[in-house]
Amino acid sequence: MFSQSLKHASSTPSLNLPTRQLGLSQRPFRSVSDFRKAKRDGRKISMLSVYDAVFARLAVEAGVNTLLVGDSVAMALYGFESTIHATVEMIASHVGAVRRACPGAFLVADLPFGSYRRGLKAAMKAVEAMARAGASAVKLEGVTGNEKIISHIIESGIPVMGHIGLTPQSVLALGGYKVQGGTEEEAARLIEDAKELEDLGAFSLVLECVSRSLGSRISSNLSIPVIGIGAGAEVDGQVLVASDLLGLSLGRSPRFVRRYLDGAALVSKAFEEFCRQVGEAQYPSEAESYD
Ligand code: KIV
């Protein structure tokens, strides 16, 4: 399927997929008002973290509402141990690839570690790079210490998505990838952080790795949508990293990941088959050769 699509990638951007009728909940979002409307109407929001043109196009054509180029790209594609290694250039380059494949999609770009903690000027430079590459909005982790920059980005005309709970860029301070908000004090702090993001003007937020009940409390306390990842079902939407749900990630997946495909097994079978057929001179055939 992919080889057929990629054959045409440079000349036409089509993936030759059959046209399907998409339901109301599967329409691509175009602007921040679609997020508000989805929450108001009680429609769950689907978001996928994708990094390349093919997966982005497949996600949009499947009806995923909104796309994210997450800093998880540093781990998923570049093999780093944490998202701390993502850079502005790395993410912007993937934003460009996704934007070229999906011109109308609502596309959120992560601001990587360090890019928004070195003053307003440095932060705005990162935001500009994402916007020029094609981002519709930026996402950044945490609230305390980021209030000014969040307001400044929003006042500059770029929508901001928050990210609280488990914030992977702070994995060293958090002491690992753990469920957050475990004590009543920590839970209250996250509820306050979420409210503050809403008050600052964020159009939505990602809530990562908290209990179901805390996810539900935070979502019901806000008028902006809460997109969960490991935050239970009673939030306003769900986000996953595409390569995780496709079973194409190296290493162990967290408990909240549902694998919709055993991608690693399928890919490895195809590679083995190619290798065997080349070895046995079964590939290429006459039809695959030029006269
Ligand atoms: O980096 C990423 O892909 C993310 C999502 C998992 C929310 O932040």
Image: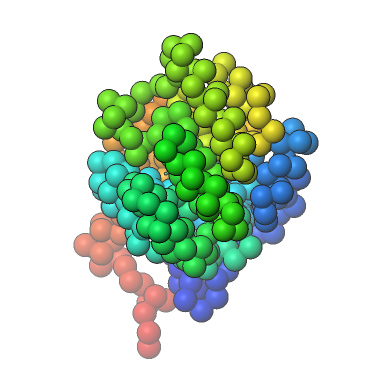
Residue 110 seen from this side: yes
Q: Is residue 229 left or right of residue 176?
A: right
Q: Is residue 54 above or below residue 74?
A: below
Of the pair 289 and 5, the residue shown nearer to us: 5
Query: Hey, which quadrant is residue 222 in on the image?
Result: top right
Residue 123 x %, y %: 41, 54
Q: Residue at the left extreme?
A: 279
Q: Is residue 200 left or right of residue 189?
A: right
Vertical arrangement, residue 72 with respect to residue 226, above or below: below
Vertical placement of residue 241 versus 282, above or below: above
Quarter holding residue 47: top right
Please give the name of the residue rendered at 40% of the width and 58% of the height, measured from the top-left corner: 121
Residue at 28%, 52% in the rendered image: 78
x then y, percent, for residue 233: 60, 25
Residue 57 is at least partly visible in this image: no
Display colour scheme: rainbow
- 123 or 69, which lies in front? 123
Side of 166 relative to 87 (left or right): right
* Quarter containing the C terminus: bottom left
Residue 150 image offset from top left, x and y in percent: 51, 46
Task: Locate residue 178, reporting x and y percent.
Answer: 36, 23
- Residue situated in front as seen by the camera: 145 or 9: 145
Residue at x 68%, y 44% (from the top left corner) = 35
Up the image or down, 198 lies above or below 52; here it is above
Name of the residue lying farthest toward the top = 184
Residue 232 horizontal side relative to residue 89, left or right: right
Figure label count: 0
Residue at x-position 29% and y-position 36%: 251
Choose between 5 and 113: the one closer to the eye. 113
Residue placed farthest to the bottom in the image?
291
